[in-house]
Amino acid sequence: MIELGVNIDHVATVRQARRTYEPDPVWAAAEAELGGADGITIHLREDRRHIQDRDVELLKQTVHVKLNLEMSLADEIVDIACRVCPQQVSLVPERREEVTTEGGLDVIAQRDRTRAAVDRLRDAGIVTSAFIDPDPAQVATAHELGFNAVELHTGAYANATGEQISAELNKLIEGGARAVDLGLRLHAGHGLNYHNTTAVASIDQMAELNIGHSIISRAVFVGLRQAVREMKDLLRPFD
Ligand code: PXP
């Protein structure tokens, strides 16, 4: 079975546009669960542009599937994760000026800082995933640093056109095979939608996909429960 982690950051983005109480990501998580989500994914950014500390605390108490916290290596955020203890942390790069996460975490360049964060998270009993580009050297380093999983960045695949699509897909297949060989759990995400997800789902041993923008966009028209159900239906053949 491929687990679907539904990223609900955009619900918080709408709320923060007015600095009010609605729409509440806690409600969104419940709706996503009712639609069949296997996990709820949130990114607590250092600038708190969407998800707030209060959301992390409440979602930890109310989510009954896996809570996956995306976050940078910043000490302040690692402290929060170790205190709240989500089931899983996905370490991602973060730049203040970016619109969304660009590129994977460079675990080779940031080896020491990454290792320190992984050690702290593991000691707190949290499963760790590295959001990295599908580069075999990054995969090997993630393994060496003690991650349980890698989430391959599918952004380049999602943005590719024409012949580039299969070239980018092949990189994901090769990176995925390397991860599985090393005993890492295989995840993928970023830019996946109702048209491009099945090719990624068909990668051998794919275990988890984290999808946000496309599901929340569809939810505006059909409701979140239905939008999640439709994505789960696409993943059904891979059960
Ligand atoms: N995985 C990671 C690590 C991410 O940072 C994001 C975006 O927050 C996603 C998955 C989901 O990407 P999208 O919103 O494009 O589906």
Image: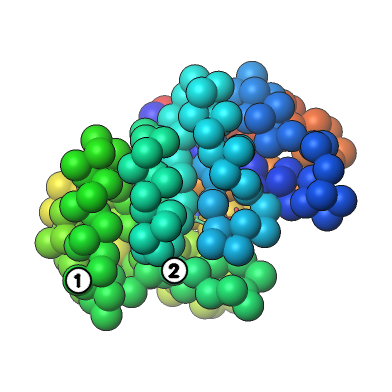
Q: Quadrant of the C terminus?
A: top left
Q: Amino acid at mark 2?
A: Pro
Q: Which mark is residue 90?
A: none
Q: Nearer the viewer, mark 1 or mark 2?
A: 1
Q: Are marks 1 and 2 in contact (CB under 8 Å)?
A: no
- The quadrant of the picture showing ligand 1 is bottom right
Q: Residues within 10 Å of mark 1 (few under 14, many from 20)?
A: few
Residue at 60% of width from left, 63% of height from top? 47
* Disc with the residue nearer the chain's start (1 vs 2): 2
Q: Which mark is residue 93?
A: 2
Whole-percent x and y of residue 199?
49, 52
Query: Is 159 on the left or on the right of 129, as rendered?
Result: right
Query: Is 125 on the left or on the right of 224, as rendered?
Result: left
Q: Is ligand 1 closer than 8 angstroms to the Cβ of mark 1?
A: no
Residue at 83% of width from left, 43% of height from top? 20
Q: Amino acid at mark 1?
A: Asp
The answer to whether residue 88 is visible is no
Q: Which mark is residue 112?
A: 1
Q: Foreground: 79 or 64?
A: 79
The answer to whether residue 103 is visible is yes
Q: Quadrant of residue 29?
A: top right
In the image, residue 149 sits, relative to residue 103, either above or below, namely above
In the image, residue 176 sits, relative to residue 69, either above or below, namely below
